[in-house]
Image (cartoon, rainbow, N blue to C red):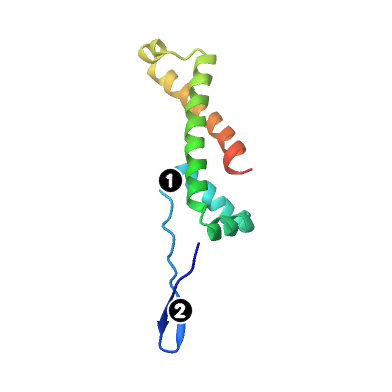
Amino acid sequence: MELTYTKCGDYYLPNLIVPKPPKVGKYGSLYLRHIKNEHRAIYNTLLYSGKLSAEVERIDREAKHLMSCLVTDMAKAQGITEQLKADDQMAWVGRMNNIRVAAEEIVFEELIYN
């Protein structure tokens, strides 16, 4: 990254551009908040090198993909089918919510808060 300067009176001031915040969802936002509050050195290194947005977007993408895979695999392993959804919607919703929460715990542990 090359700095340029603008002359204002007798002084040269750097032309600084504030980086745009990354466009991410829930998991990227949680990761960003976590490294900003708990791992300040990592946050500053990524920010000053210009790689913060790309890293947060990557974590968000990976977390969404992992959630999708985990929910699908856990639902298959527990025998949750479309037939159960048609027969007993409340049981299906309850079991799927439990699976989603368990999968989210794994995502948080593996990608967000490690």
The residue nearer to you, when weighing 30 against 50, is 50
The residue drawn where x is 61% and y is 58% is: 40
Rendered-image quadrant of the C terminus = top right
Q: Which mark is residue 24?
A: 1
Q: Secondary structure at mark 1?
A: loop
The residue drawn where x is 43% and y is 64% is: 18
Q: Amino acid at mark 1?
A: Val
Q: Secondary structure at mark 2?
A: strand
Q: Residue furthest bottom?
A: 10
Q: Residue furthest left?
A: 86
The residue drawn where x is 61% and y is 36% is: 110
Q: Amino acid at mark 2?
A: Leu
- Percent of width and height locating residue 35: 58, 52
The residue nearer to you, when weighing 89 against 51, is 51
Whether residue 90 is situated above or below residue 84 in the rendered picture = below
- Percent of width and height locating residue 55: 52, 47
In this rendering, would 92 be left or right of 73?
left
- Percent of width and height locating residue 63: 51, 36
Whether residue 34 is situated above or below residue 110 in the rendered picture = below
Q: Which mark is residue 13?
A: 2
Q: Which mark is residue 91?
A: none
Whether residue 61 is situated above or below residue 4 in the rendered picture = above
- Percent of width and height locating residue 53: 48, 51
Label 2 – label 1 distance at C-alpha: 33 Å
Q: Nearer the viewer, mark 2 or mark 1?
A: 2
